[in-house]
Amino acid sequence: MNRMEREAAVRRLLEQTPPQVPAELYADVVRRGGRMLRRRTLARRTMWLMLFVAVVAFTVWALTVRPWVEPPSQTTPPVSDW
């Protein structure tokens, strides 16, 4: 099947009237679509909540440990009696 034949086949398919959809199929599709949207919304909210908890945990850890402060040296004794 060359390109011209494929284009002609596609044109024939597009010119035909679309097939009738059974009425009971619409209710199933609406129900499944609603379920998918609820799951997607729940997953999105869960991910945002997990991100928020991770940011709070990191902030608390950083404020208590203070990794940006250099620890005091343990190899040299403190200098006194100047």
Image: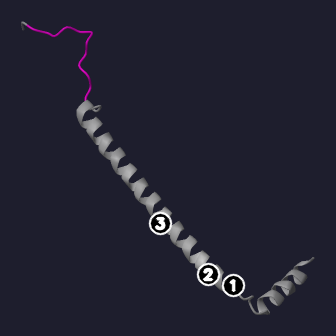
Splitting the image into 4 quarters, where does residue 82 fall? top left
Residue 5 location in percent, x, y? 90, 83
Which residue lies under the disc numbered 2? 26
Q: Are marks 1 and 3 in contact (CB under 8 Å)?
A: no
**Residue that lies at the very extreme toward the right in this rendered image:** 1
Q: Nearer the viewer, residue 59 or 78?
A: 59
Between circles 1 and 3, the one closer to the viewer is 1
- Give left or right: position of 30 versus 62: right
Residue placed under numbered mark 1 in the picture: 22
Q: Earlier in the sequence, mark 2 or mark 3?
A: 2
Numbered tag placed on residue 82 in the rendering? none
Q: Is residue 42 magenta?
A: no
Q: CA distance from mark 1 to mark 2?
A: 7 Å
Q: Residue furthest front?
A: 24
Q: Amino acid at mark 1?
A: Pro
Q: Earlier in the sequence, mark 1 or mark 3?
A: 1
